[in-house]
Amino acid sequence: MVNNMLVEYTKSTENIVKAVEIVKNKYYCVRCGNNDQSEFFIDDFGIYCRKCLNFGKSSTYQKIWRKEIKIIFNESYCLKKVVNLSNIQKIASNKCLESFKNKRDMLLYAVCGAGKTEVVYEVILRALNLGNIVCFATPRKDVVLELVPRFKRDFFQVSIVALYGGSPDKGKVGNLYVTTTHQLINYYQFFDLVIIDEVDAFPYYNNKMLAGFIKKAKKEQAPIIYLTATPPKYYTNLIRRKKIDHFIIPNRFHNHPLPIPKIVLTYSTAKKILKGNCPKKILLWLLKKQQLSKRVFIFVPKIEIGIALEKILTKYIKCRFVYAEMKERTQIINMFRNNKIQYIITTTILERGVTVPNVDVCIINCDDQIFDERAIVQIVGRAGRHPKYPFSDVVLFCDYFTLEIKNAVKQIKKMNKIAKGNKNEMYNM
Ligand SMILES: [Zn+2]
């Protein structure tokens, strides 16, 4: 059965619009913004948009009810200060407040481990205390699940709505929405401030449809704060052209520098591992960690390499392989977090988010194209985050040097230089 009425929540005037319109003889999907004619298909009743089909059909025979939501503003917010910020975090926080006040978009470029979430607390509070509706969006469901308990603890007087595929909060009303970028499809001119975490992460990065959802979900004048540890060129170009404000936090929260990765050449690595042999240099490095009782992230480029490596290594050490499609994914990650296994072999799914103290990191086959500059910087950023264990051993094992490896190391060194006070480097983004 076809649902003839789609719903979008709005803070502007309530109305009903067509879901797919014909503009100048061309189809246009009002819900997802698609106007690529090759993405429209015919069914028994009319024309539908295939681009947003995952969210349910949007078609010429359906309407969107833009339903006005009344939100009660709790006058008693005035929250006490919930976090202690370092000096540079304070400056960054003030910069966010300034951009919000001037209704300017802004990019906060903070190295992995700088504590960028805490930096936006003040601006979230300011907006909430003005009676605004705030959206904290992230491309990944894992991040929503990790952030919501933190936000509920720190913004304990605020009604927080968590949105992701299958979330029980769907349709609930609140003041602070923590959501995947996908879920914003259901909002129209709703938010007064949008913060997007990890703008360079899959699937948001280079995805026009998701960027369109954000544009639609926020009020026209509402500013966006973009957060990233590895800004894509698109944003640095906007900064150069002064289209958006920006601020850089080159220091980690604990003020120790980012670890500089060592590069170790190995030969025919993938081939050897797939045949059941682990290159000696890699094996020796891993065994050394066993004596030091350090936990180790082992990144691999492909699932088959991970499976083969797990088979080889279990003869020597306690390790598990984890990848995206795996059923026991969360379980294995938690075992690693709780120190039940010392080594975790993983694809790039763990390049962000999971933080473990006292950890060393290596990438195997770092010359594979999946490890681009930003992925390498993110992976290196897993190391040395905890103030008690700020120093880590990070090794990039590769068959040969790539430009991406070179640029990633350059990028890390540059941030450490800026953090040390070399301000000349700062504006050469
Ligand atoms: Zn569509």
Image (tube, rainbow, N blue to C red):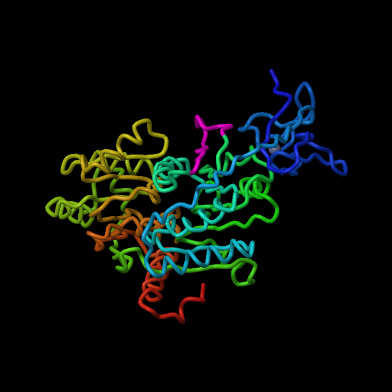
Q: Quadrant of ligand 1?
A: top right
Question: In the figure, is residue 247 to the left or right of 337?
Answer: right
- Number of numbered labels in the structure image: 0
User: Which residue lies at the image location 31% right of the left edge and 40% below the top edge?
Assistant: 333
In the rendered view, would you say 204 is above or below 84?
A: above
Of helix, strand and loop, which mostly describes the magenta segment? loop
In the rendered view, would you say 49 is above or below 357?
A: above
Location of residue 190 in the rendering, given as x and y in whole percent from the top left corner: 65, 44
Location of residue 215 in the rendering, given as x and y in whole percent from the top left corner: 66, 50
The residue nearer to you, when weighing 269 against 202, is 202
In the rendered view, would you say 428 is above or below 173?
A: below
Q: Is residue 355 magenta?
A: no
Location of residue 92 in the rendering, given as x and y in whole percent from the top left corner: 47, 66
In the rendered view, would you say 403 is above or below 273?
A: below
The residue nearer to you, when weighing 382 against 389, is 389
The residue nearer to you, when weighing 157 against 160, is 157
Question: Start and end of the magenta stretch?
Answer: 158-172
In which quadrant is the N terminus drawn?
top right
> Given the current orientation, which residue lies at the most extreme right position?
24
Question: In the figure, is residue 383 to the left or right of 29?
Answer: left
> Given the current orientation, which residue lies at the most extreme front position?
76
User: Which residue lies at the image location 31% right of the left edge and 64% below the top edge?
Assistant: 254
The residue nearer to you, when weighing 141 against 35, is 141
Question: In the figure, is residue 200 to the left or right of 325?
Answer: right
